[in-house]
Every structure is written in structure tokens, then in C-alpha cells.
Image: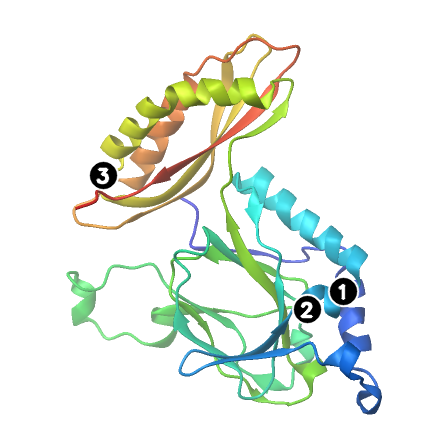
Amino acid sequence: MLPGHIVLDDFFPEAAALRDGIDAHFAEPARHRPETHQVWNYWYVPGLYTYLRTSPERVLPREPLNRFFARLRAVALFRFGLSQVTWPYLSLYVAGCQQGLHNDATNGRLGYVYSLTRWDERKFQGGETLIFREQDYVGTPAVTRPNAGSGLYELVPARFNRLLLFDDRLVHAVPRLEGSMAPGEGRLVLHGHVAEGPLEVNGALALGIAQATIDRLRPALQRRAAEAGAGLAGLVTVRLAVGPDGHVQKSEILFDRLLAAERPAADPAVAAAAVADLLGGATFPGAEGSSFVTVPVPFAPRQG
């Protein structure tokens, strides 16, 4: 199973161009005008959110921003089999800003945070992404053992040009910033959510033909997921390498984040392998060349 969070450093080759847009935006503060600078929403939800956010195209140069987003979408699809990526917010944290503990269980499969913060030159404390560790607590010996701080959570620094991806269901926060009030010296991040979309096909197979094949398999796939994944919730994505003759040459699990939603629950690794094995036996119509077919398989606990 994939870890609860993944860090990709040096993510975007044009990070400096995006940062230049921020520096230009905050330069010469005495010359700021309403049409260019009254674009920030002070998002304050008592006990939960305190920071400023805006649409990034109001501050950042549009062409490199578009290329950043295209790169993010490509990584989400080809590495994880997730084709839906939300357009980001650009958020700014200065002294006093924070996010309280929460999760985003219905917003996506992964949250993403891309940092344009000059972290190594920062004049503040706080501002990391705090992510609770995945560990059983109540009902286990952990309740009898002392624990604190990094034993319960991880702090991921918002280093410049770092992309952080994490399971949206995990409890997370941004510790309160203490220090500079200068916006250009604050925590500046692009952030949003990633989720699965419909079937994805790359290659000779027509999408409609591939979809018809998977649709015929869908009842058996749902039964397999329910039987092998009892008590689990989450998603598995499987990429099928399909030869010109329509036979699956390879079945590869790209994304597997199955967590127990009730007790007892099935083994996540066994459940993921079970749906990958079923899909690996699919037969598609022949085509003029090879194809890759990416299939998302959601798991949900029993209702009622």
C-alpha cells in the first residue's frame, strides 16, 4: 500500500518563474492598487482556518502556472492513475495564520500542497504541514504507552519547489506561524485535491470499446471488491497493458489506499491484488497496436 504521504522535491523546473510573480506582486507596497492587489480573501473560520487565499492567476504568471498544472495532472495520472485535479488556490500565511486539525475525506483521494515559500530563509516558526500518523490507538496497547509530538504526527516542511501529496482522509493541520508579517516572507503554497475520474485509455484502443469491456466486467469487479475488501474504504487503480490481440500482458497496481472503516476488516493488500487479478484476465477487442487502460476501483464499507 502507498504511504499516507509522499514528498516530491524539485518538482517543477520553472519554480523560480512562479516565485518571481510573487516577488513582483508584493514589491513596492506603497504603489499597490485596488485592481491588482484587492484580490486576497481573508479566510477566517473560528477555531479552524486563518489565512489569505486567492486564485493563483491573479498573482502568478499564467503560462508557467499552466505548465505547472499540466505537470501535476500528468504525475497524478501516470504515477497514480488519478485523472481529476482541482485548479489550485494560492494561499498566504503570515504571523497568526494557521489551519486547525481537520480532514478532507470528501474532497478527493489526495490533497496536494506545492510550496513557493523561501523556507530556508524564513523568518517565522510554524507553517509545516502536520499529518497524523496512521496507527491504531483505542483498542490497542498504544493506549497504555506515553506518547507525544512526533510520535503522533509528522511535520512536513514547506520547502521551496516541494510537492506534498497526502491521503485526504488523514487528520492534518498547519501549525500557527509566529514571526514576520511581511507577505513575501510568509508561507506561500498552491494547494488542491486529486481524485479518480472515468476510465483512461492511451494507445490504439478506442475509449468506447475499452469502456464496454470494463462495463461487462463491472458486476464481477464489484463483487470481488465487496468480498475481498470487506470493511475497507478507499480506492485502487489498476493499469492494464493490453496487446494488439486484446489480451492483458501486464496488470499493475498504481494506487492502493484501502483503510479499515469498520472492524473486522479485510487485508488491504489481498483486496487490491484480488481486483488486479480479475482485471488482468480481461480480454479486449483486437486493435492496430498496444494500449494502456487505467481502471479506478472504489471500495466502500457495507451500508446499514
Helix, strand or loop for disc 3: loop
Q: Residue at x 52, y 20 (%)?
A: 210
Quarter holding residue 55: bottom right
Does residue 196 appear in this view? yes
Placement of 6 over or under 147, stated as above or below: above
Asked which quadrant contains residue 301, the reply is: top left
Q: Locate residue 30, reporting x and y percent.
A: 82, 92
Do the numbered discs 2 and 1 sit on residues whose CB atoms are within 8 Å?
yes
Q: Which label sits on residue 116? A: 2
Name the residue beneath numbered marker 3. Answer: 230
Q: Is residue 113 above or below residue 271?
A: below
The amino acid beneath tag 3 is Ala
**What amino acid is found at the position of numbered circle 2 in the picture?**
Leu
Mark 1 highlights which residue? 18
Q: Position of residue 82 (x, y in %)?
A: 53, 42
Depicted 216 relative to depicted 107: above or below: above
